[in-house]
Image (cartoon, helix red, strand yellow):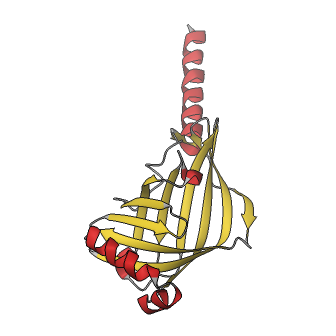
Amino acid sequence: MIDPPYLLGTYLLRKTNDISFDSKYTYLVVNDNNIKLKTIYQNWIIATKKSRTGSVTFIPESILDIVNPAKILKKTFRKRMNKVDNDVDLRVKFNSLNKYTYSMFGIEFPEIKYEEISNYNIQKNIRIQVKDTTLYITDDFGNYYLFDIYPTVNLSTRMPYVETAIYTLIFTEILSTVINVAVMKVINQQ
């Protein structure tokens, strides 16, 4: 279970300096037993979803101080500069990566997994500062990530690159075909 329970929830990436997330729609889901980082990106007419799943481990301050004494000064300086409600150091380990179909021409398809990497081992030490409904995350590589809490549980209705669901498209096409056939029969009878 995630040690600081105030981190649980779904967050939307607002701003980052990490170029791998540039002009993409990214959200973070923190559950009791895992963490998921999902990114939806569009290549021309096709949008796909990349999902990374992993675990989070709380890092006690005493371990950080033994490993790197310079972090004491940095952390003290940062705490004076940033008055935050909660401040925690975590180790994030992503251990799987899945890629799914998402949409084509703005039509949402059912998610079909087309690539799975189960030995995806990425590990980062991160520092999370929580202020109201915003997460400010920094990592060991000098990257920052600014996440806002996502207001609803149902993400599928608000994601980009989808103008209509495939089921809506099929229903609309069938209904319009039936109406066209009925109109044509009425016109041909006269």
Residue 167: which quarter of the image?
Answer: top right
Between 131 and 60, which is closer to the camera in this rendering? Answer: 60
Q: Position of residue 117 (x, y in %)?
A: 74, 67
Between 36 and 178, which is closer to the camera in this rendering? Answer: 36
Above-or-below relation of 39 to 1: above
Between 151 and 67, which is closer to the camera in this rendering? Answer: 67
Q: Position of residue 13 (x, y in %)?
A: 44, 56
Residue 84 visible in the snapshot: no
For the point 57% across and 37% down, which residue is it?
106
Above-or-below relation of 45 to 75: above
**Number of disc labels:** 0
Q: Position of residue 93 (x, y in %)?
A: 60, 76
Identity of the residue furthest to the top in this view:
190
For the point 50% across and 61% down, which residue is it?
143
Quarter of the image that includes the C terminus: top right
Q: Is residue 86 left or right of residue 21?
A: left
Residue 100 visible in the snapshot: yes
Between 128 and 175, which is closer to the camera in this rendering? Answer: 128
Above-or-below relation of 172 to 72: above
For the point 59% across and 16% down, which residue is it?
184
Q: Position of residue 45 (x, y in %)?
A: 64, 35
For the point 45% across and 60% down, which residue is it?
145
